[in-house]
Amino acid sequence: MKKRLVIANWKMYIHSPDAAKKFISLLKRKSAGLSGVEAWVAPPFTLLPVLKGVKLGGQTLSSYADGAHTGEISAAMLKAAGATFVIVGHSERRTLGDTNEDVHAQLAAAAGAGVVPVLCVGETARSADGAHFSLLEEQLASALRGAQSLAAKLIVAYEPVWAIGKSAEDAMQPGEVEETVIFIRKTLANILGRKEALRVPILYGGSVEPQNAATLITDGGVDGFLVGHASADLEQFVEILKSCRK
Ligand code: PGA
């Protein structure tokens, strides 16, 4: 049975090593009996070396391997700090200046170092003429250009930017999520080949909360979630995990 995957993107919500350690130990206890679902956590970089007991990831990475790049963290550094995956191309990083080209280089750097890339794509707005589909296609094609060999480990997170950081009422409706996930999988099939595309887990992110998690997972056609604000609240995060049980 393929497990569902729920990734906590802690952003800058949880700061202290003590609070983070306590969160993880309670999370393990409260989610111990849940079958068919797995939780991964992407804390701020500084917390990676102090946490254990759950799969950890970075929230972004440098496309460089080493050298004069003040403030950057490479894929190998992430790995050495305990990360097995990394979020790539999150819209909040794109807003800070990461281009499709940067995202492509970061994805290659992650995969090259054996760190699983969680590639985020998403439109800033939906338009009646369907322009958002072309944008998604462009984001996927440019990130995965020449990188067909990465398919074995790739995870894609569909995160409509307009739905991030709000509440369940503002999130995308399951029907729209499903339609977009089908489009993303078709696009992946064109880029990676059908067999590989079918293997890639596609997550949804953008105001996933306990209130909408159950309908999104049953009717949204996704393999799991990338959760922001609700992932920093233990009770809410555990509720979301429960909704994903199989
Ligand atoms: P949100 O964030 O759940 O707070 O909307 C999701 C994300 O940005 O990954």
Image (spheres, grey):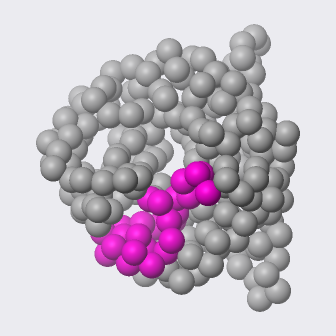
Give the percent coordinates (x, y) of residue 81.
46, 18
Q: Residue at x 29, y 66 (%)?
A: 243
Residue positioned most to the bottom: 128
Q: Residue at x 54, y 53 (%)?
A: 201
Say above or below: 26 vs 173.
above
Q: Nearer the viewer, residue 245 or 56?
A: 245
Residue positioned most to the top: 67
Give the percent coordinates (x, y) of residue 55.
39, 34
Give the percent coordinates (x, y) of residue 236.
27, 60
Q: Residue at x 33, y 21 (%)?
A: 50
Instruction: Locate residue 23 relative to residue 184 in the image: left or right.
Output: left
**Where the C terminus falls, by quadrant?**
bottom left
Q: Nearer the viewer, residue 46 or 178?
A: 178
Say above or below: 10 vs 242.
above
Q: Residue at x 64, y 22 (%)?
A: 113
Give the percent coordinates (x, y) of residue 198.
61, 57
Whether residue 148 can be seen here: yes
State which quadrant residue 129 falls in. bottom right
Please tell me whether residue 214 belongs to the stretch shown in magenta: yes
Q: How many callouts does the rendering have? A: 0
Please tell me whether residue 131 belongs to the stretch shown in magenta: no
Instruction: Locate residue 235 relative to residue 138 in the image: left or right.
Output: left
State which quadrant residue 183 falls in. bottom right
Whether residue 168 can be seen here: no
Give the magenta-colored segment's residue range: 198-224
State which quadrant residue 212 falls in. bottom left
Instruction: Locate residue 156 relative to residue 194 in the image: left or right.
Output: left
Say above or below: 92 vs 149.
below
